[in-house]
Image (spheres, rainbow, N blue to C red):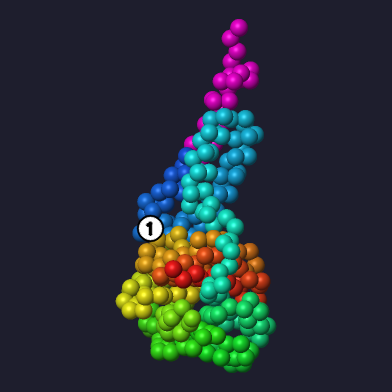
Amino acid sequence: MYRSPRDGSPSSSWSRGRAVAVLAVLTAVLLVFHGAVPGGVGGLGSLLESFLPWLGVVVVVLLVLALLRRSALALVALLLPVAAWAYLFGGLLLPAPEPGADDLVVVQHNVSDENSDPAGTARALADAGPDLIALQELVPPALGVYEKALAPDYPYRAVRGTVGLWSKHPLSDARPLDIKPRGITEEWNRGLRTSVRTRHGVIAVYVAHLPSVRLGAGGFASSWRDESAGLLGDAVAAEEVSRVILLGDLNGTVDDRALDPLTERLNVAERGVALSFPAAFPLARIDQVMARDASVGHIRTLPATGSDHLPVAARIRMD
């Protein structure tokens, strides 16, 4: 006797959930071809890429809907975005590699110019035991507090404008880095370059704080950030020292096309998610550690300080 799909026959599971299946395919397309989303109008492409890993939440929601609908069609379609997400981000969730004896440990932190406890922040960063500590939004009188608190363990430092680097290893040739966008007319110095003498030889270390982005009615405003990223990328490309470490609040994720001038030249973290902003409910990692002729093996967040960013710590293995 003929039974309609509504009677619950096996064929009905392939006819239900078509809308969920279509959404699953679209999600997979966005994950794989996010670079094709135009960025010129309202910065849509850059905005999508800033939160690209969160499309995994969409996949979970679609999975729940597919199960509620008992749709075999939707479940099969969901294999596409699951595979795409796993390919792009699954490696970040794998266990951290065993620490190497020669690894260089670094900490990156935007300490916030409104931080009410700079001394406590400095102690928290030093307690992680890194070789290098890069800070942004250094303003007086808090700068003096950081210098005093970090001096016992980090005798070498370089500060230019509102960014600085504290080191257990000798520094030399510290100089400001010109990454100021043309549209900024006031005094603005948020980049430095210095040489660090380590057991691995000389490493060129860059500390940078790129301009903020804004999300408003007109879309994703990021032109100053994008221009500054290009200038920073040019500086890295011209660097004569083979090994380079970049530490900074780049106001962008490594998936954001605006950081291509950097991510095309430098290695990014192989393990760890380390969402760093905003500290109260982290949605994205905009505090970055990158390297050339070295691998960023693992990145993680440290406990919250008095800043609106979380500190990130990374292990760097020399290639």
The C terminus appears in which quarter of the rendering? bottom left
Residue at left 41%, top 75%?
244
- Quick one: quadrant of the N terminus? top right
Q: Residue at x 52, y 90 (%)?
A: 156
Q: Check disc 1: other Cα within 10 Å, few if <14, some if 14-19, many if 20+.
A: some
Is residue 275 in sight in this rendering?
no
Name the magenta segment's main secondary structure.
Answer: helix
Above or below, comparing residue 253 to residue 249 in the picture: above
Q: Is 310 above or below relative to 170?
A: above
The residue at the point 38 percent across, 58 percent down is: 39
Give whichever of 317, 283 is nearer the camera.
317
Q: Is residue 232 left or right of residue 297?
A: left
Q: Is residue 229 above or below residue 155?
A: above
Rendering coords of residue 30 (x, y %): 45, 48
Q: Secondary structure at mark 1?
A: loop
Task: From this view, report whether residue 198 is shown above or below residue 226.
Answer: below
Disc 1 residue type?
Gly
For the question of whether residue 263 can be seen, the reply is yes
Is 271 magenta? The answer is no
Count of marks placed on residues = 1
Image location of residue 77, percent across then percent down: 51, 35
Looking at the picture, how far across and down is residue 63, in whole percent? 60, 40
Q: Looking at this rendering, what residue extends furthest in the top direction?
A: 1
Q: Which residues are magenta?
A: 1-24
Residue tagged by mark 1?
39
The answer to which quarter of the image holds residue 127 is: bottom right
Q: Position of residue 285 (x, y in %)?
A: 54, 65
Tell me what residue is drawn at x 37 percent, y 67 percent: 265
